[in-house]
Image (cartoon, grey):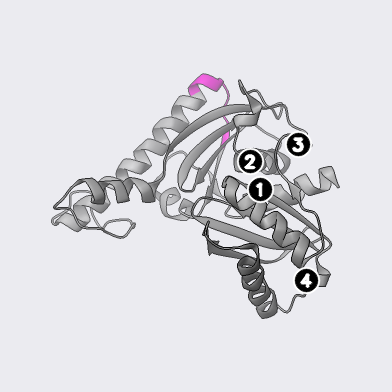
Amino acid sequence: MLLVIDVGNSNIVLGIYDGEILRRHWRVSTDKSRTSDEYGIMLQSLFSLASISFSQVKAIIISSVVPPLTGVLDALCRDFFSLPPYIVGPGIKTGMQIQYDNPREVGADRIVNAVAGYEKYRSSLIIVDFGTATTFDYVNVKGDYCGGAIAPGLAISLEALFQRASKLPRVDICRPPHSIAKNTVNSMQSGIYYGYVGLVDGIVERIRQESKEQPRVIATGGLAVLIAPESKTIDEVDELLTLNGLRILYERNR
């Protein structure tokens, strides 16, 4: 079995693959203060609930945008699984041309998503990943990673509004009943929700115009299912895109 680990700023998503079949997957909070032993104990609990043993794991691959945790999880793999993990970064084989001024600057998660998306659709793509930051990545019809855009994530935008506006409360992220709201909570939800839908559709349309192609638009990440129904440009939601990309990269580098 293959253990895939995607480390984001807000969440760590883990999955267990048996060949191409995803047996189980989990989403846990990212905590930079945890040690490798603490993460190991957490994994033991998750594996136990899924009736999976550490000895069944024969390989591990990690994608991380949180540098302090990369070393922690590397130690976890070596101490608990006796396995050196593959870590997505410079030197790993992607099978994809990276057309970026400095390819080392591209986040590992963005490359993983691009690889997974092109492997699945074999067409030009825009991948929108709703994480702590929302990223827009364009892959052309030849399968080259061409760059994209980064915007503040939905959650941190809402948190900034609460922190900087003294009279505004902290509210949940949800689709409001109306765009013309009748109270402060719904007004904030309307502004952040429909404003964000507009941001997504606006950036996607600009990328389409510049690309001179008609790329398929794939959404992934924790909040994709919330935004996609109202978006005019998102064609499909694939919540497991990053995990599948890690599996593909492992196969290309094993």
Circle nearer the viewer, 3 or 1: 1
**Which quadrant of the figure has residue 16?**
bottom right
Q: What's the magenta region?
A: 209-216
Q: Who's the residue at 46% across and 43% down the image?
A: 133
Dot 1: what SS?
strand
37 displayed left or right of 212: right
Please report whichever mark, 1 or 2, sits nearer to the chain's N-terminal start. Answer: 1
Dot 4: what SS?
helix
Disc 1 marks which amino acid?
Answer: Ser
Please report whichever mark, 4 or 2, sits nearer to the chain's N-terminal start. Answer: 4
**Which residue is disc 2 drawn over?**
108
Disc 3 marks which amino acid?
Answer: Thr
3D distance between C-alphas at marks 2 and 3: 11 Å
Residue 94 x/y as whole percent: 75, 36
Dot 2: what SS?
helix
Near mark 2 (Cα within 10 A), the count class, few <14, some 14-19 or many ≥20, is many
Which label number is shown at residue 94?
Answer: 3
Instruction: Note whether 21 is above or below 151 in the view shown.
Output: below
40 displayed left or right of 210: right
Please report whichever mark, 2 or 3, sits nearer to the chain's N-terminal start. Answer: 3
